[in-house]
Amino acid sequence: MKKMIGLAGSMKKHHSSSEYLLSVALEAAEEQGVETELLRLNDYNILPCEGCGNCMNGKPCHLLKKPEDQLTELYDKLKEADGFIFSSPVYALSLPAVWKNWIDRCEPCSAEDLDFEHYNYDRVAGVKGKAFKGKVAGQIVVAAGPGHEWALASLMPCFTAIKLSMIASAGISLIEYDGQPGIRKRSWSKPIEEAESAKMMARAVGLRVASALGFSYFDSPAEQGQVRWEQQQERAEQADDWSAFTVQNIRDEEVRLGALAEKQPRIFVIGDQQASSRCGPLLEQLEQQFGGQAACALIARVGQLPHFITHEFVKEKTGQAVPGFELYYDWEDALASRCSVAPGVPAILVGRTREEWQLFAVDGTQGREIGRVVDYLEEAIV
Ligand SMILES: Cc1cc2nc3c(=O)[nH]c(=O)nc-3n(C[C@H](O)[C@H](O)[C@H](O)COP(=O)(O)O)c2cc1C
């Protein structure tokens, strides 16, 4: 069963509107078969970052050793979840300080998170991903009047930096439902339980995040891809050439590049989505020059897809980009490191037998690169 944690950031002990709406969102998620738990950020004593820089030098945060610091307790809970909903009041057109205090401590928070050699934000985010990376989140922000729009945006870049996908946000002004004693005694005050439109928004956030648990822009399949790539690299190193690499054909069958090139020489254009407009003309040019001697095909580097984009959709689009050519897919982008070709830059891989494989990056100086392919092919194949 998937688990969702709701983290409430209200400073109030009672009558918190944002915490009430968080419980509505969690109830909606429970209806979808998700296990939920509500935590209060303010129940954890998180000492403020002192900027010592330990975490940037491969050492654990020294605050973790202080018995009064409860960041580890909070992380241990967050690690259990597949996704989160954060709720908060608006304070001074932003979020209360507890949020910023917490996010400032979102550097490596335990010795096990420190298995990196050099400080690098991505790497750090990757390691502490046990708590965040590859997970989804939603947020609910409640104001009395103006400011929910700024508050919603205020921590977004921080969440992105820790590779948490923020996929649903609801911001609302609810002055007549406000739990402050000064407002509750007014004649126009109403209980938050009657704020129907706000409850609908909270439910929508809960349902949306529940439906997306397990999917993320920074999803773990990328890491699985890394594992697969390492296996493939090992195989390739054993075979000492490209022929051991596998891709999938249009029918999702796994095929070895070597097997494809056994019968006839192959010219593969390798490209990702950004390079797709250059791949079609490149393939046509290669087909014109070498169609007689080698079969030209596309290997689409795919990698992480948003959860609403299916493999079928990608196949349809690649088919349209390079009509008439054979198509192969590297779904987890395992060839990326092998190619060492930047995103958006196509590459040409030419192969014949086990020993004769050559990779050419097609950068801005396309003519020169094609020239090298021509030279190689004339020598090796023609
Ligand atoms: C220190 C402080 C600053 C606030 N700043 C704003 C603000 O900038 N804009 C606003 O609309 N409401 C502001 N409010 C009102 C709260 O956003 C509002 O009471 C909210 O419903 C509280 O949510 P909670 O009940 O979950 O704590 C502020 C309240 C406090 C205590």
Image (spheres, rainbow, N blue to C red):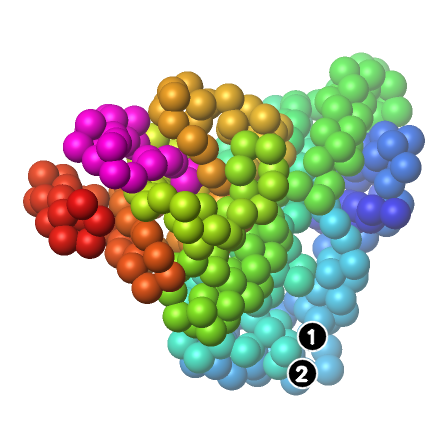
- The verdict on label 2 being within 8 Å of ligand 1 is no
Which image quadrant is residue 279 in?
top left
The quadrant in which residue 289 appears is: top left
At x 51%, y 28%, the residue is 314
Residue 165 drawn at (x, y percent): 59, 42
Quarter in which the C terminus is drawn:
top left
Q: Position of residue 3 (x, y in %)?
A: 82, 48
Q: CA distance from mark 2 to mark 1?
A: 6 Å
- Circle 2/circle 1 CB separation < 8 Å: yes
Figure check: 240 above or below 174: below
Specify the segment rendered in magenta: 278-300
Magenta span includes 283: yes
Q: Secondary structure at mark 1?
A: loop
Q: Position of residue 181 (x, y in %)?
A: 81, 35
Kind of residue sitting beneath label 2: Lys
Q: Residue at x 88, y 24 (%)?
A: 193
Q: Is residue 214 visible?
A: yes
Residue at position x 37%, y 35% from top?
297
Q: Is residue 346 left or right of residue 173?
A: left
For label 2, the residue is 66
Q: Amino acid at mark 1?
A: Asp
